[in-house]
Amino acid sequence: MRNLFVLSVVFAVAHFTAPWNGPAHAAAPESQTAAKPLLRDFIGINGHTIQFKPELYAKVCRLVRDYHSFEWDMGRDTDFTPRFPEARNRVNWDSVYGSWQKAGFDTDVCVMFNNTPPDAWKSLEKDPRAYGQAFARAFGPSSAGKLVSAVEVGNEPGKYSDEKYHTLLESMAGGLRAGDPRLKIVTCNLTTKQSGNYEKSVVCLKGLDKLYDVLNIHTYALAAGWPTWRRTFPEDPHVDFLKSVQDLIAWRKEHVPGKEIWITEFGWDASTKPNRTDGDFAKWAGNVSDEKQAQYLVRAFLVFSALDVNRAYLYFFNDANEPSFHAASGITRDFQPKASFYALAHLYRTLGDYRFRRVIAHQAGEAYVYEFQHGAHPEQTIVVAWSPTGSKRTAEFSLPLAGAKLIRAERMPLTDRAAEGETITVQDGTARLPLTESPIYLWLAK
């Protein structure tokens, strides 16, 4: 396999310490812990209608986002009266979303308008409202099936001007709200900057505060755009992967405090095929190894959990191993698990009942060390530590235990075998943690 992302392998060893007062033995203050979701209510995945296999991906998370085409439901007639639970193309949403619910999933539906440009509507002021109201009544939390908990008004509606998207959001969100007030209404992909081909500016939301509940953002760790689309590691301070989210958090705080923020797309491509030699992707350098994809996805979830956001959905569930942009982002390859599948399943099993509590160390290029606290048993904590780099770096971190007992430690796995235990040296009340780019988990208790 030709891997254009990792150009060199650098090994480094560092020794450093960070002050810490040991694991929590009582509930942390409201501002630190209570508002944070449990990881099982935070980790999500992007699926796609009839292709998604809920029983398989239930091992990784319980939140799923679907790309749901408006055209499937309505055809070319935007004033068509939907015949839910069937789409106009005869897909039965009760069957699709019912199977997801049966497997334990909470479903967020992203209604997409890719094939319905602004000039295709018979009435942009009326038709989205009628559709939204019918959809919410058929599938929302107050319906008989309770199949859908949230609906997004568009994914990346770049064909819509700011004015047209404002009208679309106002109309459809109004219908969704009227159809089921319990349904969460989510915006399309947003930016605090000017609108682009794949995102709408937050200026489109002016005056609509009461019609939506969640601000939505997509973020990718791109070190370069076309023609290489080169990606980097999630903690890289030189890219906007985290900054774009932090900018939206700051905007929310100033303009619409109390609204949730969901990251509904992020990910890394991992293909085992050689690069194409011609065409649009001949210079593509966005590929990472299966191991890197696993490391970066897990670490991204951990980093996101420390931010003031409510959910994060990885992109994508499955791929066909194509070496091109966004075409190898699945955690399964032809529905066979990649290393990332096993690493994320381990993350979900390990931290599902825990929530982020605090940062112990946050040193760019050196060490990230986070503490998570059990939701029902706050005396139980798990510390997760890793090297926030992309160069196969190794290091050591000295963690004062402050009287806590180290129960066990294990490294993030890359296969379906049980995670291997790690031997940790404890001397004079300090644990010496061997850091790699694969997170290490430590169970601690008083």
Image: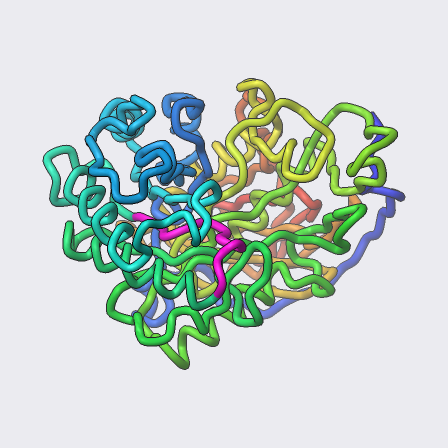
Q: How far from the left and from the top, in percent, is residue 2?
A: 85, 29
Residue pictured at 44% horizontal, 33% vertical: 47
- In-front residue for pair 397/314: 314
- 221 left or right of 21? right
Residue 172 visible to the viewer:
yes
Q: Quadrant of the C terminus?
A: bottom left
- In-front residue for pair 40/69: 69
Q: How far from the left and from the top, in percent, is residue 330?
A: 57, 31
Label count reads 0
State whether the magenta stretch is mostly helix, strand or loop: loop
Rendering quarter of residue 372: bottom left
Indicate whether residue 156 is drawn in magenta: yes
Indicate whether residue 269 is drawn in magenta: no
Q: Quadrant of the N terminus?
A: top right
For the rendered model, the colour scheme is rainbow
Residue pictured at 34% horizontal, 42% vertical: 109
Depicted 81 relative to depicted 425: above or below: above
Q: Which residues make up the magenta segment?
A: 151-161
- In-front residue for pair 296/401: 296
Residue pictured at 36% horizontal, 52% vertical: 153
Q: How far from the left and from the top, in percent, is residue 306?
A: 48, 61
Depicted 18 relative to depicted 183: above or below: below
Rendering quarter of residue 252: bottom left
- 72 left or right of 425? left
